Image (spheres, rainbow, N blue to C red):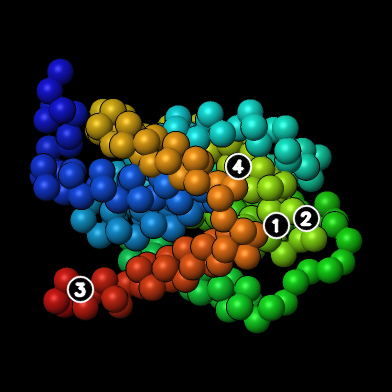
Amino acid sequence: MSPFGLIPSDVSLNVALAICAIAFVSGTARGFSGFGSALIFMPLASSIAAPRLVAALLLIIDFVAAMPLVPNAWKHADRQATAIMVLGALVGVPIGTYFLSVLDPVTTRWIISGFVAALMALLLSGWRYRGKDHATLSIGIGGLSGFCSGLAQTGGPPIVGYWLGRPISFTVARANIVLFFGASDFFSVVSYFFTGLITADSIKFSLVVGPVYAIGVWFGASLFGKASERVFRAICYALIAAAVIAGLPILDGVLRGR
């Protein structure tokens, strides 16, 4: 089958190529840090294609391409702590998916941009949670991340902001993040399917974009371990900051000349 038959009718060849390029960059971020794909992919891809299409597309390709990262993450993660957060995602994902199906794209982007901007300010302030781990707190963070994943596949900031602030090695933090999103993506696939967000177009298009994204994930994973912990954290924070800037609807309007 020709790749042209896999591209949705309302997506031009140039747009499809641009989405593939975005997928490679976002996949590299995902493979290296364990998150970041949506923070790059969603703001850029949704500016040139329908947000519902690109959200479902990202979910499909990330779910498939990131699965090879899970076995290694299972070895190094704090599985008990991660499981508690997964309980929150089980509730948050369906709620976020519902809002994606009823809200207009601009409102959705304002919600995500506002939340990420607040989190970035918190991270840059240097504040860290030094108290004991509580099941209620972990479930709440997992639920918030699940909500953001269901809404726009941007569930990284709550989880990353929490794990990078904990007194644990960045190897364990990365493993926790990867393991959490393995479970969260599964919940999202089920939720998107039953709300009709996963369509034939998104599945077919994933056969074009998916391999490019997978190469990016592999490339990013090969880079992990070659950077210091300080560089690792700096890259994660830079990705969050980029999401705030790229996701602003006002900026999008300026770029489109409105």
Would you name the residue on which mark 4 appears?
Answer: 178
Local crowd size for mark 1, using a 10 Å CA cut-off: few (<14), some (14–19), many (≥20): some
Going from the N terminus, do you reach mark 2 or mark 3 first? 2
Going from the N terminus, do you reach mark 3 or mark 4 first? 4
Q: CA distance from mark 2 to mark 1?
A: 8 Å
Say which mark, if any, is on residue 163.
1
Give the position of the C terminus as an image quadrant.
bottom left
Seen as rendered, the residue at the extreme front is 226
Q: CA distance from mark 3 to mark 4?
A: 34 Å
Which of the 4 quarters of the picture holds residue 234? bottom right
Across and down, in percent, residue 75 comes to 72, 32
Would you name the residue on which mark 2 appears?
Answer: 168
Amino acid beneath label 2: Ile
Going from the N terminus, do you reach mark 4 or mark 2 first? 2
Say which mark, if any, is on residue 255.
3
Local secondary structure at mark 4: helix
Local crowd size for mark 4, using a 10 Å CA cut-off: few (<14), some (14–19), many (≥20): many
Across and down, in percent, residue 162 comes to 69, 61
Q: CA distance from mark 4 to mark 2?
A: 15 Å
Local crowd size for mark 3, using a 10 Å CA cut-off: few (<14), some (14–19), many (≥20): few
Across and down, in percent, residue 28 comes to 42, 47
Local crowd size for mark 2, using a 10 Å CA cut-off: few (<14), some (14–19), many (≥20): few
Going from the N terminus, do you reach mark 1 or mark 4 first? 1
